[in-house]
Amino acid sequence: MSKFVYRAKDWTGKTVRGVLDMATKAQVVESIKSSGLVPLMVEVDKDNVLKEFYKRFAYRIKFKDITSMTRQLSTMMTAGLPLTDALQLLKNQLETNPPMYEILDYCLNQVRGGQPLGKSMIKYENIFGEAYIASISAGEEAGVLEEILTKLATNMENQNEFNGKVKGAMIYPMIVVIGMIAVAFVMMIFVIPKLTSLYTDFGSKMPASTQLLMSMSNFATRWWFLFPIFGVGLVMFSKVTEKNPGLRLKVDLYKLKIPILGELNRKTMLANTLRTMSMLLAAGISLVEVLRIVSKVAGNEVYYRSYVRIAERVQKGFSVSNSFEETGVFPLIVEQMVSTGEATGKLDEVLLRASDYFATEAEQSVKALTSAIEPIIMIILGLGVAFLVVAVIMPIYNLTSQF
């Protein structure tokens, strides 16, 4: 929906101005005519566009915002508050967060009008996610919304904690790497050219290390604009990849084959998808529907196609364990645990344990990775500094030895 400003004439010839909130300009024109007015001008409200742009970047809705909202809503409803009262209290608390306030205000009005909470959230599916909305809808249909909200909040808190540990462990290496790149860029563009011009004036023969450094500096100085172009090219390539399933499959396959990082990506993805499956099954959603939803949560074309394939086989009557095994992309432990869960009738509990297992494995992999990265970075820094020292000092030594 967008806001449109319009100017029109009524039957007396009087000019009427107003604002309408509609999807398209054609709908606004039709609405004005149906009111007995003659439209003169209809434009998108530019002030509103600027406000929306500002809100989008100044008040981004984060995963932890949704998690906090879910926990508070769960606590209020468990305490006996009706859904409308709980939503009203939450809305009042989030006046300082315009996007969340807007979402809760819309959902509250829809619920007061007789709509289920899950259905009212569909408008914001890009924020909540299909799995979240499906769980809410299932909880409402079964009359156990409080329990579903509690499970949702717990699962989201676990996921938030896991993601936080992974990101936290990678902060130090990323800062050091970015610092190295920034220092190297400044040296190559601004510092080295001045030193090399000084050496050239003396006319002496430069050592091989200095000549290599001068060549690198000349390339960086002359072709510096290629670096931002390369960055823009990567962004454009990612956009094209998102719209091309075949290309996306090749890229995602390559990501999974990257040493260390590929395995970490696989474990993280399995932890998230299996946790989501457990949550949806506990909410009472059918297994086929759960697999269809989880396929979109995977974030990897290889696993997306695998979950879709499993859903199709289960719908045809094949067992879940056999369908997981048939894809050939899941680790043996997943196939074994799914088989156990299917045999005992406790698939949701077994999947949750499997999720915890892969979350722990991913966390340990991150710690091992960061422990290995730190000495590697120190070695690279040492070699870089040694190369610069040799390349810069050797010409000075050669010049002084001539006198």
Image (tube, rainbow, N blue to C red):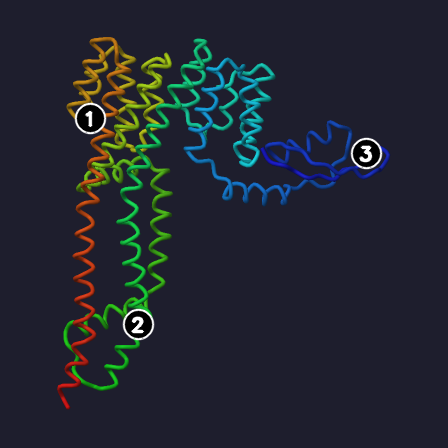
Instruction: Name the amino acid type tagged 3.
Output: Asp
The Cα–Cα distance between marks 1 and 3, rounded to whole angstroms, is 67 Å
Residue nearest the viewer, comparing 135 with 302: 135
Looking at the image, tell me whether mark 2 or mark 3 is earlier in sequence order.
3
Q: Which residue is mark 1?
A: 330
Instruction: Name the amino acid type tagged 1.
Output: Phe
Pinpoint residue 342: horizontal percent, then vertical percent: 22, 11
The Cα–Cα distance between marks 2 and 3, rounded to whole angstroms, is 71 Å
The Cα–Cα distance between marks 1 and 2, rounded to whole angstroms, is 52 Å
Given contact means CB atoms under 8 Å apart, are the residues at marks 1 and 3 in contact? no
| Mark in front: 1 vs 3 | 1
Mark 1: secondary structure: loop
Q: Which residue is mark 2?
A: 191
CA neighbours of label 1 inside 10 A, class few (<14), some (14 to 19), many (20+): some
| Mark in front: 2 vs 3 | 2
Task: Residue at 28%, 68% (x, y): give it.
Answer: 219
| Mark in front: 1 vs 2 | 2
Q: Which residue is mark 3?
A: 10
Q: Quadrant of residue 36?
A: top right
User: Would you place residue 251 above or below residue 343 in this image?
Assistant: below
